[in-house]
Image (cartoon, rainbow, N blue to C red):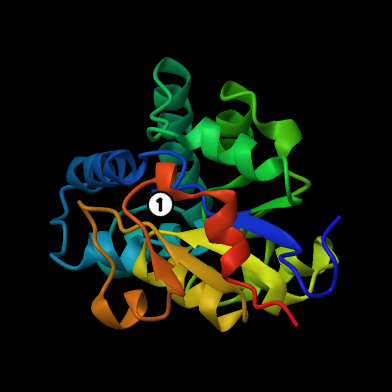
């Protein structure tokens, strides 16, 4: 068990960190928008990253003009995501190994913008559910990323000191969320949707892949007293 002067917990993001889901989210949301006869705004993909389910479903309706109720639009997208995950779970290389490697040393949390249904689908399909002591979806807190709400809740449930928690994030809004919660952040930038420079600057360190996510690296981010 970690002492007060060591890393107390590690928190993973899900989309873009453990699963290569951002292209799939984009594809399915674009299809919903196209089926509604609406145009996809040039900034929509980046704007939607990190939003909670109520936020992105409202964005599709209020900003893009998809007809319907938010809960119905959300269900349409989420059901399509679940079906695709069950057909072929897009785990990123090294995801299972990274989770198991760090779970051997620290309690793990998950702070995800995905709804609970998708979190469960991913973790169960990858046989990783038992590795996480705490999982929180942004649909279960007051606001999605870049708000720190989801990280604040994970840290609270882990009974940890935020300054001694290390998060792994990939997107601009994820990096901003974790940083605002006061945790140390390791960035693994998504090459297809790279974080903005000001968000990337919030990270304590930047690595190229999950293979670089070692025990030594994580431990080095929390100074010893």
User: Can residue 56 be seen in this snapshot?
Assistant: yes
Residue 59 coordinates in the image, percent (x, y): 37, 65
Q: Nearer the viewer, residue 32 or 155?
A: 155
**Mark 1 Cα shell of 10 Å, populated few (<14), some (14-19), many (≥20):** some
Horizontally, residue 24 falls left or right of residue 147, namely left
Horizontally, residue 162 falls left or right of residue 113, namely right
For the N terminus, the image quarter is: bottom right
Q: Residue at x 38, y 32 (%)?
A: 93
Q: Is residue 168 above or below residue 181?
A: above
Q: Residue at x 53, y 32 (%)?
A: 97
Residue 87 coordinates in the image, percent (x, y): 41, 16
Q: Residue at x 46, y 75 (%)?
A: 204
The quarter holding residue 94 reads top left
Residue behind mark 1: 68
For the C terminus, the image quarter is: bottom right
Q: Nearer the viewer, residue 207 or 196?
A: 207
Q: Residue at x 71, y 65 (%)?
A: 7
The quarter holding residue 219 reads bottom right
Residue 65 coordinates in the image, percent (x, y): 27, 61
Q: Nearer the viewer, residue 75 or 173?
A: 173
Secondary element type, mark 1: loop
Q: Is residue 91 above or below residue 112?
A: above
């Amino acid at each position: 068990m970690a002492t007060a002067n060591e890393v107390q917990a590690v928190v993973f993001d899900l989309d873009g960190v453990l699963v290569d889901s951002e292209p799939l989210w984009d594809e399915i949301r674009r299809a919903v928008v196209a089926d509604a006869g609406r145009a996809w705004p040039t900034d929509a993909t980046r704007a939607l990253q990190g939003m909670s389910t109520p936020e992105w479903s409202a964005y599709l309706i209020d900003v893009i003009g998809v007809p319907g109720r938010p809960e119905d639009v959300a269900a349409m997208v989420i059901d399509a995501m679940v079906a695709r995950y069950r057909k072929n779970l897009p785990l990123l290389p090294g995801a299972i190994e990274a989770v198991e490697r760090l779970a051997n040393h620290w309690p793990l949390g998950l702070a995800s913008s995905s709804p609970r249904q998708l979190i469960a689908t991913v973790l169960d399909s990858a046989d990783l559910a038992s590795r996480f002591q705490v999982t929180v979806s942004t649909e279960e807190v007051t606001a999605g990323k870049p708000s720190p709400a989801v990280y604040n809740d994970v840290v609270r449930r882990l009974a940890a000191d935020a300054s001694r928690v290390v998060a792994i994030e990939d997107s601009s809004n994820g990096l901003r969320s974790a940083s605002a919660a006061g945790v140390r952040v390791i960035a693994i930038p998504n090459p297809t949707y790279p974080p903005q420079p000001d968000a990337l600057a919030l990270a304590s360190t930047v690595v190229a892949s999950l293979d670089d996510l070692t025990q030594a690296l994580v431990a080095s981010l929390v100074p010893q007293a």
